Image: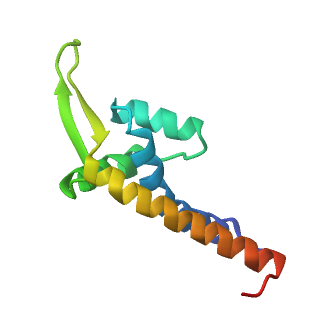
Amino acid sequence: MVSDDILRTHLQELRRGTVVVASLIALRRPDYGYALLQRLSTHGFPVDANTLYPLLRRLEEQGLLTSEWNTEESRPRKFYRTSDQGESVLRTLLDDLAAVQTAMTGLIEGVDR
């Protein structure tokens, strides 16, 4: 039987890249970090805040997200949005994800190319 630690490690590795894709999709509609955490979790992508916020900063540094501060509420919040460059990268990532899914399905079904 596989230990819980081993399984947890492999699940974490599997999800690591999908969180980037999920975030770029979700942030097509501007949102702030905490709301994004909730939305990702609701859709099956539970992410720790200590993972998401550095990811958002990295994606912004790479030009895949833009951000702006909303100071209209009592507490200022930084809103993120997928940039045009982020949208282009997202399309490529989604195409690759679809190709991976097709390849996995072929392996599962025993289809030879």
Extreme residue in the bottom direction: 112
Q: Nearer the viewer, residue 47 or 80?
A: 80
Residue drawn at x 69%, y 65% as measured from the top left: 4
Residue drawn at x 45%, y 54% as measured from the top left: 21
Q: Is residue 75 above or below residue 19?
A: above
Q: Nearer the viewer, residue 97 or 9?
A: 97
From the top left corner, tell me how far across and down residue 78 is, in percent.
23, 32
From the top left corner, tell me how far across and down residue 43 is, in percent.
59, 39
Residue drawn at x 54%, y 45% as measured from the top left: 46
From the top left corner, tell me how far across and down residue 89 is, in percent.
35, 59
Residue drawn at x 51%, y 63% as measured from the top left: 95
From the top left corner, tell me how far across and down residue 53 is, in percent.
31, 46
Residue 61, picture quadrant: bottom left
Residue 29, picture quadrant: top left
Q: Is residue 11 above or below residue 42?
A: below
Which quarter of the image is occupied by the C terminus?
bottom right
